[in-house]
Amino acid sequence: MPKFLIQASYTCDGTRGLLREGASGRRAVVEQVVTGLGGRVEAMYFAFGADDLVMIVDLPDSVSMAAASLTVKASGALHTRATPLLTLDEIDEAARREVSFRAPGA
């Protein structure tokens, strides 16, 4: 199952919601969303700095990740970034594939 790194920052409204519900309340909501899409939460951490929340989730496919992302972003409570994570074996496979490419100006 594909893994995704999710980095999020709360808006003012989202932060007020977090203060009301607490971190464990938000964890329950995240679990519900991810398992509802057939995935699982591998790790979830709150942070401070540019990101308020960092997670690694397993989801069945990119469409599931996009569905979650669209729904969360539409709430206006969070700004998120999702990065697909690749295994070492996947990178090894990619490195073995021959790709025809000409650099600009070459």
Image (tube, grey):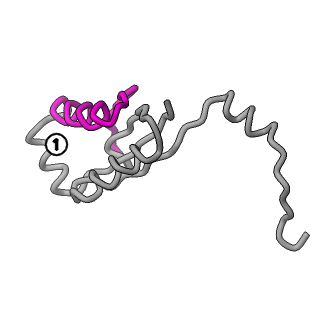
- Between residue 44 and residue 58, name the one nearer to us: 58
Depth order, front residue of 20/35: 35
Write down the region rendered in magenta. Answer: 24-49
Q: Quadrant of the C terminus?
A: bottom right
Query: Magenta stretch containing residue 38, yes or no?
Result: yes
Decide: few, some or many residues near mark 1? Use Cα within 10 Å; few <14, some 14-19, many ≥20. some
* Residue shown at 42% from the left, 35% from the top: 59
| 71 up-or-down from 84: above or below | below
Report the residue marked by disc 1: 18
Toward the bottom, the furthest residue is 105
Question: In x, y percent, where is residue 43?
Answer: 38, 27
Going by the image, does 102 lie left or right of 72?
A: right
The vertical placement of 58 against 105, above or below, is above
Looking at this rendering, what residue extends furthest in the left direction? Answer: 20
Q: Secondary structure at mark 1?
A: helix
Q: Quadrant of residue 28?
A: top left
Furthest residue toward right: 106
**Looking at the image, how many numbered discs can be counted on the residues?**
1
Query: Residue drawn at (35%, 29%), measured in percent from left and top?
Result: 41
Q: Is residue 85 left or right of residue 25?
A: right
Relative vertical location of residue 69 with respect to residue 94 in this rendering, above or below = below
Which amino acid type corresponds to the residue marked 1 in the rendered image? Leu
Q: Residue at x 35, y 31 (%)?
A: 38
Question: Residue 32 in the image: x percent, y percent?
Answer: 23, 33
Residue 99 in magenta stretch: no
Residue found 83% across the figure and 70% down from its top = 104
User: What is the x, y in percent for residue 91?
Assistant: 70, 35
Q: Position of residue 37 (x, y in %)?
A: 32, 36
